[in-house]
Amino acid sequence: MTSYDLILAAAAGAVCLAICVMLLSLGQRRRYEARIAALKARLSREGAGQDAPAWVEAFDTAVVAVEGGRASLAAGGEGLAACAKALGVASDVQAVVAALGDADPNHAQKLAALFERGEACAFEARGQTASVSVEGRASGALAWLRLTAVSGGDSGLPSAARFAAFVDSVVEPCWIADADGQALWGNGAFVRAVGASAASGSALSGKSFDRAADAMVAEAASKGERREAVRWINLEGRRRAFRLSAQPLDGGGVGVFCADITEIEDVRDAFKKHVAAHDETLNHIAEAVAIFSATRRLSFHNTAFAELWGLEPAWLADRPTHGEILDRLRQRRRLPETIDYASWKAAELARYEALGPQADDPWHLPDGRTLKVVRQPHPLGGMLLIYSDITGELRLKAQYNALIQVQQATLDKLNDAVAVFGSDGRLRLHNEAFETFWNVTPHALEAAGDFEGVVELCVPRLHDLAFWRELKGRVADPDPQMRAPTSGEVRTSDDRIVVYQSRPLPDGATLIAFADVTDTRDLQSALADRSAALAEAERLKRDFVGNVSYELRTPLTTIIGYSELLERADGISERGRNHVAAVRAAATQLARSIDDVLDMAQIDAGEMALEIEDIRVSDLLLNAQERALKDAQLGAVTLAVECEEDVGLIRGDGKRLAQTLDHLVENALRQTPPGGRVTLSARRALGEVRLDVSDTGRGVPFHVQAHIFDRFVGRDRGGPGLGLALVKALVELHGGWVALESEPGAGSTFTCHLPESQQPGAMQPELGF
């Protein structure tokens, strides 16, 4: 078979298949047309009232069939008339259906969805006098509408289907349960919550929203009373709080409604925590706090309240009234003393009626305490009271005011002009001397206020603006380096020399003081001139003493030398020898006096240097005895040495210590009558060596003892009176000191206290002026 033959065969088969399909379609169309004709005939018969269901007429219900936009009455002519009357249209089925769509655009959309797509609907169309309940369903090519006129008391009630749709739209679970708590029907939220497949029937068997809720439903059914409870339930993976209400229904069953109060419970819990934290905070403050409710009962008090008033915690826990607390406090004399307590109490309780803020009230208690009472209305009703013990505060304030007054009085007594400026530049404090110094009045200073204003008052007497700018930096600049203390001198326009100084104060303020030192500077200049003149006079004195001593030493040396030769010369009578001896003694005494004067001058000038070395104390005493032995024998005085074995060595200038002992021994011999005794002794004690020169002479009068070591004292036997003064100066050069113990008629003891070790030029600190 060729390809052409195959093509012809395929074409013939296709033509045959098409003819068969066409014939089948014509047969199906004839059958559908016959069925439609039969349905139309039946609809016509029903519309004419033939075989209409009895229940339709009993309930004033009309059944309407709609096909292709054409409506026809299937049953319920009286019901249609009632619906037409409710809608205010003619008793025509087409007019009634049109009125349903015209009543509300939403109704028109629902009807269109029913007619075109077969979507069921249910709504209530309101007319002029009543309303019409509409339920729509689709069956094959027809759309069926059941219309029911609702009037009178039932006009506002939705239909069962409509109400079920409404309940189903609620986002929180709602359901109807039997007497045992088993759910019979539930809305969409309930179905989702229990994981059921349908809203009623066997799909809900064994499903439970909450076991405690089931028990509550059973109790409500058995008691016939409404029951409510708050339950926390895990829903969709989150723990939520629901308020469950179980209400028995007419005809049996219990309706259960849920309200999601999670946020409310969270807020309530947060509020409780906030209140607990607030109460805990109030318990830790020092002030006593009490909160009274709107019924004037104590609703809260902190620990300080019970401690302040000494009230029993158990009694306070019973929540006494405000009046009862006042009565108990009055019995224990812990309230302010008042003549008419009843009136005072009534006025105190009348404060609950005042809604605005109230002034603080001080209470002076009988035990000496002072309380500050703060009252304010409580946001939840009642009153909040705060009791603060301000006894210490008042005491500190009084002390502070007294301190300020003392400070101001002290500043007013100062001769210096003092002003204190705060860190903001404001004038805080000034004394009367500041007003006098700058010739300003107190009123002008008060009006000036700050540093700039004060400067304007002071510029007429001190024109240097750069000085004032630098001083302002010390007051207002926060830089610590700028606030460092400063001082200096300036000259005013009236030729006064003014010393100023600024000092930062601990509180951030700055003290500025001015002092007129013009007279002081003049006096200092005069003193400087006089000091220079005295220094020149001192220099001239030293030169004069040196020259005079040199001029006197030369002839004295000659006199002493020739007198010694004459004493040993032959041919001189005994009387002549006595005269020569007297001349030599006088010359020797004069030479020693000159040496003493020179030594004192050298000490006064600070030019005497000690040659420190180790000195054996016993040798020092024996040498002094040897030098004075001849004079002691001439005066018939016993000269003895008493030295302990362990005295040992001492550091010092041997020449000057020997000179010291010579003067003391000479003084003792001069004061001791024939037959008396002079004793040289030494001992070591407490880090020092004591050299004593004692005599049994006539002693030193009490009125002379205080000045015995002064210069030019005790010249009863000749000489310049420098011996004991020189002793004191030499001992002090060694860092020691000299003392006298004497009683008239019982002798004297001079003691030299010398340190064991000594450095050149050392002196006692208190004597080293």
Image (cartoon, rainbow, N blue to C red):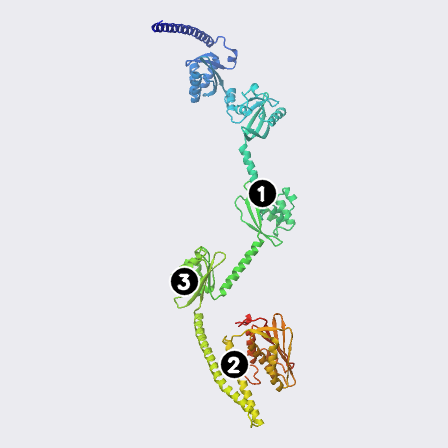
Place of residue 713 in the rendered image (x, y in percent of width and height, measured from the top left):
56, 81
Amino acid of disc 1: Asp
Contact check, label 1 and label 3, Cβ < 8 Å: no
Quadrant housing the N terminus? top left
Asked if residue 693 can be seen in this view, the reply is yes
Query: Which secondary structure lies at badge 2?
Result: helix
Q: Which mark is residue 279?
A: 1
Label 3 to label 2: alpha-carbon separation: 60 Å
Q: Residue 270: name its quadrant.
A: top right
Reading the image, the residue beneath label 2 is 597
Label 1 to label 3: alpha-carbon separation: 59 Å
Q: Residues within 10 Å of mark 3 (few under 14, many from 20)?
A: some
Q: Closer to the N terminus: mark 3 or mark 2?
A: 3
Q: Nearer the viewer, mark 2 or mark 1?
A: 2
Q: Nearer the viewer, residue 226 or 732?
A: 732
Place of residue 391 in the rendered image (x, y in percent of width and height, measured from the top left):
58, 54
Reading the image, the residue beneath label 3 is 458
Q: Nearer the viewer, mark 3 or mark 2?
A: 2
Q: How many marks?
A: 3
Q: Residues within 10 Å of mark 1 (few under 14, many from 20)?
A: some
Q: Which mark is residue 425?
A: none
Instruction: Check the image and report above or below for 48 versus 221.
Output: above
Q: Is residue 672 left or right of residue 164?
A: right
Amino acid of disc 2: Val
Query: Which secondary structure lies at badge 3?
Result: helix
Instruction: Check the image and report above or below for 25 versus 109.
Output: above
Q: Nearer the viewer, residue 46 or 575?
A: 575
